[in-house]
Amino acid sequence: MKIKSAELLITAGRPDQYPEEGKFEVAFAGRSNVGKSSLINSLINRKSLARTSGQPGKTQTINFYEINKEIRIVDLPGYGYARVSKTSREKWAKMIEAYFKVRKSLVEVILLVDIRHEPGEHDKMMYDWIKSCGFNGIIIATKADKISRGNWLKHINIIANKLGVENKEFIIPYSASKHTNRDKVWETINELVEI
Ligand code: GDP
C-alpha cells in the first residue's frame, strides 16, 4: 500500500481519550520486545513514528495511528516483561479489556510472536482472549530474517500447535528489517477493513 500520510493521533490511557469511532482499526498485540514498534514502522514506512519506551513493559498506553486518513493502526501495550508489578499487570489487563469491549471500529487484533521461539503462556492466553472476542486470530511471526526461509514452515508449525491455530495461512512471517511480506500484511489489513 502506498503510504501518503501517517500520524500519531493520540496516546490514550482511558477510553474517553480514544479518537472518535468511525474509521476501521486493526490493533497489534504482543510480548514486549517482540518487534511491534519495528513492524508498525516498517508497515507505515517511517523510521521511528512508533517507539518503544526505554523500559520494556512500562508503556501502558494505547497508541492510535492514522494512515492515509482512512485506516487506523493501534499499538497495544506489550506484556510479559518479568519485572512488572502485579498492579501494572492488572492495569494492563483492564486497559485492554476496556478497549476490546467498547471499541466498535476494531475489526481485528493481530498477535505478534517471535518466529524463532515457541510462544509462551502469556501469548497463549492473549491468543485465546483474542479468539474469544470473536476476532479471526491472525498472527505475525516477527524477525523472520533471523532464520532461513527453508525453516519458516517448521517454526510456523510450532507456533500453530502451541496456540491452536487451525489455518496456518493465518500465520504470516515478517521481517521489519527487510520489509518481507509488507504487501501481504497490508493486503490482509485491507481485506479486514473492507468487510
Ligand atoms: P517492541 O518492544 O515489540 O516494540 O519491539 P521493537 O520493535 O522495539 O524490537 C525489539 C528488538 O528486536 C529491537 O532490537 C529490534 O531492532 C529487533 N527487531 C524487531 N524486528 C526485527 C526484525 O524483523 N528483524 C530483526 N533482525 N530484528 C528485529
Image (spheres, rainbow, N blue to C red):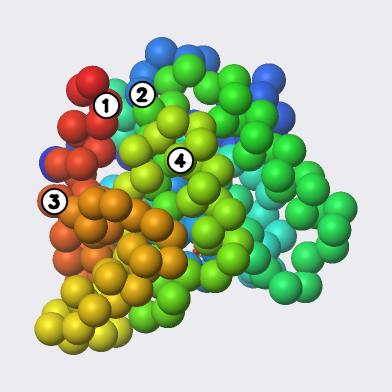
For the residues carrying marks 4 and 2, which lies nearer the camera in this image? 4
The amino acid beneath tag 1 is Val
Q: Residue at x 43, y 60 (%)?
A: 163
Residue 138 is at least partly visible in this image: yes
Residue behind mark 2 = 24
N-terminal of the pair, mark 4 or mark 3, is 4
Residue behind mark 4 = 131
Kindly report the distance in space between the C-alpha atoms of the residues bearing marks 1 and 2. 6 Å
- Percent across and percent down for residue 48 are 42, 59
Residue behind mark 1 = 193
The amino acid beneath tag 3 is Asp
Query: Ligand 1 within 8 A of label 2's CB?
Result: no
SS for callout 3: helix
Q: Residues within 10 Å of mark 3 (few under 14, many from 20)?
A: few
Are the residues at dot 2 and dot 3 in contact (C-beta closer than 8 Å)?
no
N-terminal of the pair, mark 1 or mark 3, is 3
Query: Ligand 1 within 8 A of label 3's CB?
Result: no
- Percent across and percent down for residue 92 are 71, 47
**Ligand 1 image-quadrant field:** bottom left
Q: Nearer the viewer, residue 45 or 57?
A: 57
N-terminal of the pair, mark 4 or mark 2, is 2
The amino acid beneath tag 2 is Phe
- Percent across and percent down for residue 177 are 27, 72
